[in-house]
Amino acid sequence: MIYLRLFFEFFKTGLFAIGGGLATLPFLQDMSARTGWFTTDQLADMIAISECTPGPIGVNMATYAGFLVRGIPGAVTATLGLICPSVIVILIVARILKRFKDNKFVQAAFYGLRPASTGLIAAACLSVAVIALTFPKAAGETGLPQIRWQAVILAVILWLLMNLGSIKALKAPAWLKKIGKLHPVVFLAASAVVGIIFHFAS
Amino acid sequence: MRTLLELYWTFVKIGCVTFGGGYAMLPMLQKEVVESRHWATEEELMDYYAIGQCTPGVIAVNTATFIGSKLRGILGGIAATLGVVFPSLVIISVIAAFISNFADLAVVKDAFVGIRVCVFVLILNAVVKLGKASVKDALTLCICVAVMAASVLLDLSPIVFVLCAGIAGIVAKVLLAKEGKK
């Protein structure tokens, strides 16, 4: 009953990998060693592809690994296994939260939690900046990473397009305001096209 | 009308464009959930994120489950979660089946360097919006800066920061406020 085992292995991974998709990595490495379902090379491929495709990285990894084991049914089983523990925990927490949300301790706690959440996301933003705007270091290379100037220019242009329209003091023209309100996916697609035209990866 | 189908479909759309991990989902959530549909506020989004850091599971999925359950209880939580994982299931299965060297194609690499730049700017915007909603006084500013610095410089689990910040909030608002009344 390989589906049961697949579900169970990914259930365990989902239960213990706290704090983001790449936290699943050590569990997947261990799974690879114990089950032989995929090799470490395939794991590296999984990571590369998961970063390139939409969707949470942890979910992408589970889907890919499951697919390698048993095709589409395997992919579905592994993914459901991964998300099961978190869905259960969150539903319980959400219920408790609903009942206690007007409690003054709970409200006070969230008053402190919200800026912390912002701080964590700001820290993550910083690491995303490094990944997006610098070249990865070659093995043994020391010193500060090299800046990708094309990326920095694109970043500045994107920021201007997204934000100038909403800074009231600047009284931006109507077309600029409209651009600022476009759905993020438009900017993503445009950035992908720019990347391709200007060969960002070389 | 917040039918289960609408919930599912909204999260499919969000799942389709979340490139690069849970934090990239934030700008999409702000656009679709907070700004377009008013299903949650900025504050609630941050609450879910904070809790999602401490509970098992992928943060993008946890946030989807929270929002879904807020709107339609258990079924809503499940619908939203299935929605957000569905695009991955389809896209990854296709890639795994046909183009396993997808990540090595030059066109793909070029496109994704561009996409990552955009993701950075989107998250930056999102952080600014969250900052406006969460940093209201000196204490919250301190918490935000302290957590950001500690998170960058130290290797502690986010759970530590979340717990400390929660306790700081309780101390400040409940315990010290009582002192003031004596």
Image (cartoon, coloured by chain):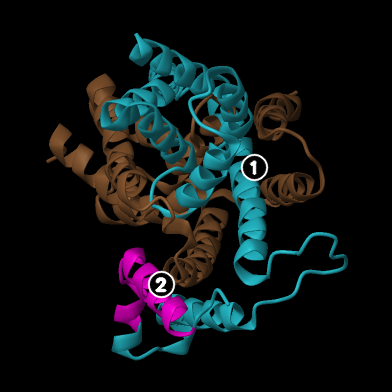
Q: Secondary structure at mark 1?
A: helix
The chain under label 2 reads A
Q: Is residue A53 magenta?
A: no
**Which residue is rendered at x = 43% and y = 48% of the image?**
B42
Viewer-proximal residue, B15 or B173? B15
| Residue B160 x, y percent position in the rendering | 72, 30
Neighbor class of circle 1 (other Cα within 10 Å; few <14, some 14-19, many 20+) is many
Q: Is residue A191 magenta?
A: yes
Viewer-proximal residue, A19 or B30? A19
**Which residue is rendered at x = 51% and y = 64% of the image?**
B116
Seen in the image, is B25 located left or right of residue B167? left
The chain assigned the colour brown in the figure is B
Q: On the image, which quarter does residue B78 sit in?
A: top left
Q: Is residue A126 visible?
A: yes
**Which residue is rendered at x = 26% and y = 45% of the image?**
B12
Q: On the image, which quarter does residue A196 sit in?
A: bottom left
